[in-house]
Image (spheres, rainbow, N blue to C red):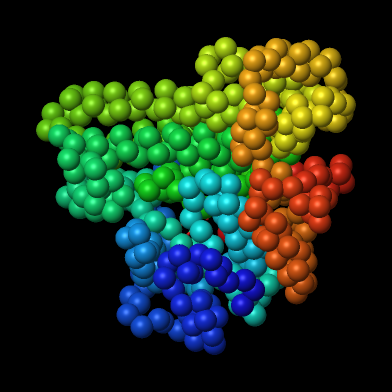
Amino acid sequence: MIRLNHDLANKLGIDVARLGSPEGLAILSGNQLADGSEPLAMAYSGHQFGGFSPQLGDGRAILLGEVVRHDGVRHDIQLKGSGPTPYSRRGDGRSALGPVLREYIVSEAMAALGVPTTRALAAVASGDKVQRECLMPGGVFTRVAQSHIRIGTFQWFASRQDYDNVKVLADYAIQRHYPDAQHHENPYLGLLNGVIERQAKLIAHWMQFGFIHGVMNTDNMSISGETIDYGPCAFMDIYDPLKTFSSIDHQGRYAFANQSSIGQWNLTRFAETLLPLLDDDLKQSIAKAESALGTFSDIHQTELQKRYTAKIGIEAGDTADWSIVEALLVAMAEGNADFTLVFRHLSDTLESGNDSLVISLFDQPDAIIEWLTVWRARLHECDHSQVVSLMRRTNPVFIPRNHRIEEAIRSGNNGDFAPFHRLNDLLQHPFTAHAEFTEFEDAPLPNEVVHATFCGT
Ligand code: AMP
Ligand code: MG
């Protein structure tokens, strides 16, 4: 056992002591079945980097079963890396330890930041070695999700023209995730609207924190609206809208600022699977789907605007405020400024009246000096203590920086999990500065910068 998420186990009504016992460990490493568990691997298809793969599925994951949380919300419990399944193709069904630690750190950090996400229940070392570029220590990750239904799950049936089962799946997804859609005059349109709304807001929420998902294939987009699949994801250090990390994203398809349009592209693939359910007449179906998809941009942009104007201390900002945000982003991109530090230091600047710290984050100071004047003028009539408080609730001190994740993985691979635990502990309170952890606020030194991430397959 490397780490067990007590808080999450309690919320799910799982007995922590039992989970931490030898029996629990045997279950979490895939060596023993829990009573009543009927494990299954799910089939799905998906567009990967734009190309359609009809035959994917849980190749290194297995669903153990479901638990119902105190508030009635049902959750899947899934092992990742416990061995081959019918969908493993030529893979080994295993996971190296690195991706296990990475998913644990980042998914729990996202949860603490308030972003809808799958969660980490446990990370265990398998004791075996797995063959990747070289032999690496293996691990098993236990993931908790509101469900593992993906856009790709719908595509599995739709691409086989099996619309009876698209309907079964849609009815199931409505009942599990969008019960209000049952009362919609067209429940399947209600489902489509619901998924569009949650995804549009989710992607804006990622962007609030400089998060790059990295592999927004349709099989990695959850119908429940949770962030899923923490393969090559990363938080930006220096702000760059075209930033990618994934070692296989050569064209920048999943770059930071492209996430908005890719979200809509993925939802269009989802809408296609529902066409036969939306109306008996195909033309009508297409019109309904197009009109639903047309709402994506507005929902996403409104959410983005709300989140970004809050980052500069403006509640319920308008279009003029959005231009102030855009000017800051341009100055940050041109000045190679650290995304997280700029926003956090702006609230300090407002409090202290000393601009030098924030200015020092920029290569070229002119643009930010000019911007600070505009920003101060905008806030002239606001109550500064309220502004600072909004900014500090919106701009984290701590994000899981890539060089820290790499450090935790490196140590973990050598059997030392102290850096992994420390990172997880401090990321549980991302908005609160902590004297003991100031070095975790810092951007990487030039020799610490991580340039590429890998999906770990
Ligand atoms: P991902 O890049 O994690 O979204 O995975 C893409 C596909 O490859 C999914 O169908 C996975 O189940 C499958 N896959 C990834 N790693 C392995 C592995 N080690 N063994 C078998 N299948 C895998
Ligand atoms: Mg995946």
Compared with residue 410, is residue 183 higher up or lower down, i.e. above or below? above
13 and 106: which is toward the camera: 13
What percent of the width, then of the height, locates residue 398?
70, 47
What percent of the width, then of the height, locates residue 370?
78, 13
Compared with residue 108, is residue 27 higher up or lower down, i.e. above or below? below
Residue 137 visible in the displayed image:
yes
Compared with residue 410, is residue 246 higher up or lower down, i.e. above or below? above
Q: Residue at x 67, y 42 (%)?
A: 396
Q: Residue at x 49, y 51 (%)?
A: 117
Is residue 385 rendered to the left or right of residue 44?
Answer: right
Q: Residue at x 30, y 34 (%)?
A: 193
Image quarter hosting the N terminus: bottom right
Residue 327 visible in the displayed image:
no
What percent of the width, then of the height, locates residue 114?
53, 46
362 and 453: which is toward the camera: 362
| Number of dots carrying numbers | 0
355 and 162: which is toward the camera: 355
Is residue 64 rendered to the left or right of residue 350?
Answer: left
Image quarter hosting the C terminus: bottom right
Which image quarter: residue 67? bottom left
Is residue 370 rendered to the left or right of residue 166?
Answer: right
What percent of the width, then of the height, locates residue 36?
32, 80
Is residue 420 rendered to the left or right of residue 124?
Answer: right
